[in-house]
Image: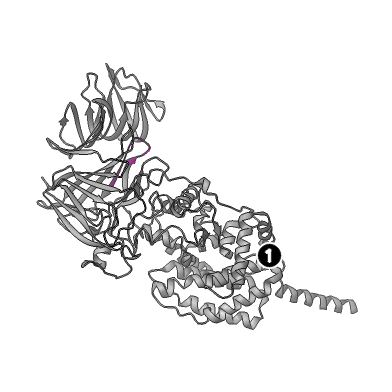
């Protein structure tokens, strides 16, 4: 009996100790104490993790401050510096009393969505110290948390509210409600990216800020917390992986600032990073992109190095930051970051977005993009089907409207842009309309075709929902090559539902003044600060310009005014171009050249061409002459000695010597004695380059499955993706083959 009594007392003592001082693994429902030893070891063996420990202790010793700093730093210091955990517990408790208890939750972004990040840090901190608190005290703090979390608004900003409900239920061990909240969180999260490719329907600025801001941790960091807890469906989610690659590689210009689509406030105020004092990284996402994909990580390092100017930053000592970078002891997969791994993202075609970039690894690289969402729109989405944005030589060149906040009109120098105009009128974007009517839908048919990786790159966006007709917008990017500068050609192909409807194209250069070089033909915009230090914000000393050349003669050109970029102190009244075109038999094909230049890249000489049913431009740079033409593709055209049939034609000569051609159509023949070119039974898209150092003619082809006859000197074989295909017919200097459906590398031998 005596021994039994001793055992009973010992059992009670052990139970009491387990309650107050849990063994490893017997911890809060979110943060697992089995990871503590592993995390402490990292702090002593790794420079990066050691710096985060020092940061956490330093912040904790500073006393009261921002909720995220107090909660995040003291919770991490508690784990990594257990000898002094008493003072860290007191700091967390004090913040509960002075902030969590008194905070007011409203229904707006500033009063609901923003405060949710404070509750996020508070839940994690309380989970860490819960067993060090008396039950009555713990219950009181939990009550305050529950009251505030359940008051978070569920409406326009669903993910933050459901994230906090989900984490609170997990903290409380309420599995049933946790699972229900998780369903809603996942639905809300999925509204912020396209499931197939990750492109954000909210707009580039909104996307990169919300998914990187430390003030949106409830939304952007909860997936990491879920992964930490073993819900391994976020780091492998194709949509979120695509979102990370999109944000760092394509939502931003090569110098790190956003291209403006959707609810983007401005290129300076919304950035894909959250950094203070030059090199202290507040939010982990720009350095933790490797959790999602190697590409996202490399692109993020480019932004960090080239956009922020950080080569050896310090990640702030918050528990959530440490947790993301360290991971769990079980997986033992800590990650670091090194800006030497940086890479500028190459050209890429998403289903909902096209990105065509010049190949140099430089902040001066050229970049044009086209947005064409196929669904998944939300409040922040604008009416921007087939809209374009553009950057080059270190500046934003073409911009869409953005906005200045919900329901905010903007007036600058007597010029007003209403919220309705910015948010809901397609005229505020670089896009096309029919009969002056704004787009009726935010949804198009996506990027339906394209090719990248050659000296000429191409993409096509299709729209059959937003207009009273159909619109095919093609971009042909002539990469810097053959010793001359790069530029873009936009070909718009329109069919209207009503006879007599005209077509309207809006161009919004990122400049205050649109200068006329030749009326109804050529205009130039200087990207510069205007007198009186008004916008736009500029990032270089390159004296960058954008020449807009109307290769297809318009019926008229209107120069209109709007207000731009008001949020971060660089607001300015801006000219934009509204170009009107007549239709013939309800059809129009329109060619526009967009040629960027700066003090080291001269704009080419541009000359309008009209030949038969084809219109376009000669683009002359030194000895290089390009010819770009467009039509409905039905008739055969001729210019100089070349003969062709297609919607889009672009070919290059060097001192009269034929170099290359791009065609979206059915035929092309050069004027040489031995012709170079093709003819096909059905339209194809093809780029071919003759200057291949004696290795034959090569390029790319997009086929729906058709017979193609190729013309070239002594041609005897055709290879697709490196494999020879059967010859259907062969004659002198020509062969015919059946090209299957698909996009292929092609070589003529």
Question: Which is more toward the observer, 23 or 577?
Answer: 577
- Magenta stretch contains residue 595: no
Quadrant position of the N terminus in the picture: bottom right
Residue 173 seen in the figure: no
Residue sitting farthest toward the front = 532
Residue sitting farthest toward the left = 500
**Helix, strand or loop at disc 1?**
loop
The span shown in magenta is 450-461
Q: Report the residue marked by disc 1.
A: 25
| Mark 1 neighbour density, 10 Å: few (under 14) some (14–19) many (20 or more) | few
Quadrant location of residue 415?
bottom left
Question: Which is more toward the observer, 76 or 375?
Answer: 76
Percent across and percent down for residue 645 are 19, 33
Percent across and percent down for residue 282 are 51, 62
Magenta stretch, main secondary structure class: strand
- Magenta stretch contains residue 460: yes
């Amino acid at each position: 009996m005596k021994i039994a009594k001793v055992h009973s007392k010992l059992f009670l003592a052990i139970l009491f100790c387990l309650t107050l001082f849990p063994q490893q693994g017997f911890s809060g429902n979110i943060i697992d104490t089995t990871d503590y030893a592993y995390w402490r070891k990292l702090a002593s063996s790794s420079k990066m993790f050691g710096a985060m420990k020092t940061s956490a202790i330093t912040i904790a010793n500073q006393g009261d401050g921002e909720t995220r700093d107090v909660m995040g730093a003291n919770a991490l210091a508690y784990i990594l510096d257990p000898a002094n955990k008493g003072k860290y517990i007191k700091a967390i408790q004090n913040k509960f009393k002075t902030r969590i208890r008194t905070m007011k939750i409203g229904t707006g972004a500033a009063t609901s969505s923003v405060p949710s990040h404070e509750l996020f840090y508070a839940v994690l901190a309380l989970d860490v110290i819960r067993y060090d608190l008396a039950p009555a005290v713990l219950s009181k703090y939990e009550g305050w948390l529950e009251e505030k979390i359940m008051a978070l608004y569920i409406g326009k900003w669903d993910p933050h509210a459901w994230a906090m409900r989900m984490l609170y239920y997990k903290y409380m061990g309420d599995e049933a409600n946790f699972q229900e909240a998780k369903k809603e969180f996942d639905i809300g999260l999925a509204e912020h990216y396209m499931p197939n490719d990750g492109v954000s329907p909210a707009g580039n600025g909104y996307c990169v800020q919300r998914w990187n801001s430390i003030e949106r941790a409830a939304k952007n960091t909860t997936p990491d917390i879920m992964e930490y807890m073993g819900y391994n469906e976020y780091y492998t989610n194709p949509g979120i992986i695509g979102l990370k690659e999109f944000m760092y590689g394509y939502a931003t210009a090569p110098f790190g600032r956003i291209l403006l689509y959707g609810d983007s406030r401005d290129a300076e105020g919304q950035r894909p990073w959250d950094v203070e004092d030059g090199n202290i990284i507040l939010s982990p996402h720009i350095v933790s992109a490797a959790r999602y994909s190697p590409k996202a990580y490399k692109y993020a390092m480019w932004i960090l190095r080239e956009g922020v100017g950080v080569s050896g930053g310090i990640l702030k000592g918050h528990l959530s930051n440490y947790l993301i970078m360290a991971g769990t002891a079980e997986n033992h997969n800590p990650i670091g970051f090194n800006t030497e791994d940086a890479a500028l993202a190459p050209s890429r075609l998403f289903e909902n977005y096209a990105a065509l970039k010049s190949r140099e690894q430089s902040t001066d690289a050229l970049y044009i993009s086209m947005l064409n969402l196929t669904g998944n729109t939300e409040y922040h989405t604008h009416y921007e089907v087939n809209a374009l944005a553009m950057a080059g030589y270190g500046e934003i060149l073409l911009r869409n409207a953005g906005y200045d906040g919900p329901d905010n009109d903007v007036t600058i120098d007597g010029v007003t842009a209403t919220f309705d105009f910015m948010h809901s009128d397609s005229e505020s974007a670089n896009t096309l309309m029919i009969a002056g009517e704004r787009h009726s839908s935010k949804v198009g048919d996506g990027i339906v075709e394209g090719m990248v990786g050659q000296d000429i790159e191409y993409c096509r966006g299709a729209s059959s929902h937003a207009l009273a007709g159909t619109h095919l917008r093609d971009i042909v990017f002539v990469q810097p090559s053959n010793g001359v500068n790069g530029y873009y050609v936009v070909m718009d192909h329109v069919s209207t539902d009503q006879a007599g409807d005209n077509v309207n194209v809006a161009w919004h250069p990122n400049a205050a003044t649109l200068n006329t070089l030749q009326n109804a033909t050529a205009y130039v915009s200087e990207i510069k600060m205007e007198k009186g230090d008004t916008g736009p914000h500029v990032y270089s000393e390159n004296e960058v310009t954008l020449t807009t050349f109307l290769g297809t003669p318009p019926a008229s050109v209107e120069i209109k005014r709007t207000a731009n970029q008001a949020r971060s102190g660089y607001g300015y009244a801006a000219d934009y171009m509204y170009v009107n075109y007549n239709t013939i038999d309800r059809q129009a094909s329109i060619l526009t050249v967009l040629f960027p230049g700066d003090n080291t890249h001269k704009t080419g000489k541009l000359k309008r061409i009209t030949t038969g049913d084809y219109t376009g431009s000669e683009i002359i740079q030194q000895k290089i002459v390009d010819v770009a033409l467009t039509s409905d593709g039905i008739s055969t055209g001729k210019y100089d000695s070349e003969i062709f049939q297609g919607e889009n034609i672009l070919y290059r000569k060097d001192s009269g010597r034929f170099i290359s051609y791009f065609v979206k159509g059915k035929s092309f023949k050069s004027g040489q004695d031995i012709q170079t070119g093709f003819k096909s039974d059905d339209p194809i898209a093809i780029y071919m380059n003759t200057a291949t150092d004696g290795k034959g003619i090569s390029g790319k082809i997009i086929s729906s499955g058709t017979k193609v006859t190729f013309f070239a000197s002594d041609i005897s074989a055709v290879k697709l993706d490196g494999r020879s295909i059967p010859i259907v017919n062969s004659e002198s200097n020509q062969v015919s083959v059946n090209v299957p459906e698909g996009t292929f590398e092609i070589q003529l031998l």
